[in-house]
Image (tube, rainbow, N blue to C red):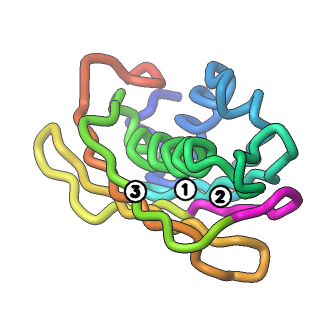
Amino acid sequence: MSAADLSPQSLAEACAEAMWNEDNATRHLGMELLSIGPGEAAIAMEITGIMTNGHGTCHGGYIFTLADSAFAFACNSHNQHAVAQHCSVTFIAPAFKGDRLTATAREVSRRGRGGIYDIHIRNQEGEQIAEFRGHSRTIKGTHLPE
């Protein structure tokens, strides 16, 4: 069966599986892919002691990385290799050791080679921790054979 024979949901799932197997950073940080769909993904991660900074809160780089991973899975769900072209994050509230953060990515726009994705990061209580916007750019290659 080729990628063209798959439903959009099945295609997103197959692309996510192919990416997950090669994504050492996401797996090494203990992230968990909660859901995947065309143009969307949700990934969770527990904040550990080595992720905290001198203020005793989660280092912003780990929050950014969690959001970036959700962004990557969402923008690669259409069987076209896509990379980050530009990203920005706004930190709203601190996260702490033991918190379980979830980054939920949603496609806002996808035209030509560019895409825009909004990623909301919340803790286990549903409190808003950060907002991330990613701009993607497609490059040569697919995750699955056409």
Query: With 62 as the anchor, is 134 left or right in this view?
Result: left
Q: Nearer the viewer, residue 120 or 40?
A: 120
Which residue corresponds to the image point at 52% horizontal and 47% vertical from the top-left?
64
Q: Earlier in the sequence, mark 2 or mark 1?
A: 2
Compute the Cα span from label 2 to label 1.
5 Å
- Where in the figure is residue 135, as x and y percent of width and height? 26, 47
Pair 3/2: label in front: 3
Within the magenta stretch, is there residue 100?
A: yes
The residue type indicated by label 1 comes to Ala
Q: Which residue in the protein does label 3 denote?
A: 89
Q: What x and y, as percent, mark residue 11?
A: 50, 43
Disc 1 is placed on an element classified as strand
The answer to whether the residue labelled 3 contacts the one labelled 2, judged by CB atoms less than 8 Å apart, is: no
C-alpha gap between disc 1 and disc 3: 17 Å
Number of other residues with Cα within 10 Å of mark 1, as a class: few under 14, some 14 to 19, many 20 or more? many
Inter-mark Cα distance, 3 to 2:
22 Å
Amino acid under disc 2: Ser
Q: Which mark is residue 63?
A: none
Based on the picture, tell me whether residue 86 belongs to the magenta stretch. no
Q: State the residue at coordinates (72%, 57%).
A: 57
Horizontally, residue 138 falls left or right of residue 81, namely left
Residue 85 sits above or below residue 124 on the image: above
User: In the rendered view, would you say 66 is above or below 79?
Assistant: below
Q: Please name the amino acid that badge 3 sits on.
A: Val
Give the numbered dot on residue 35.
Answer: 2
Q: Which residue is mark 1?
A: 41
Which quarter of the rendered picture does the C terminus lie within? Answer: top left
Of all residues, the one furthest to the left in this rendering is: 112
Give the image location of residue 14, x and y in percent.
Answer: 58, 37
Q: Which region shows up in magenta?
A: 95-103
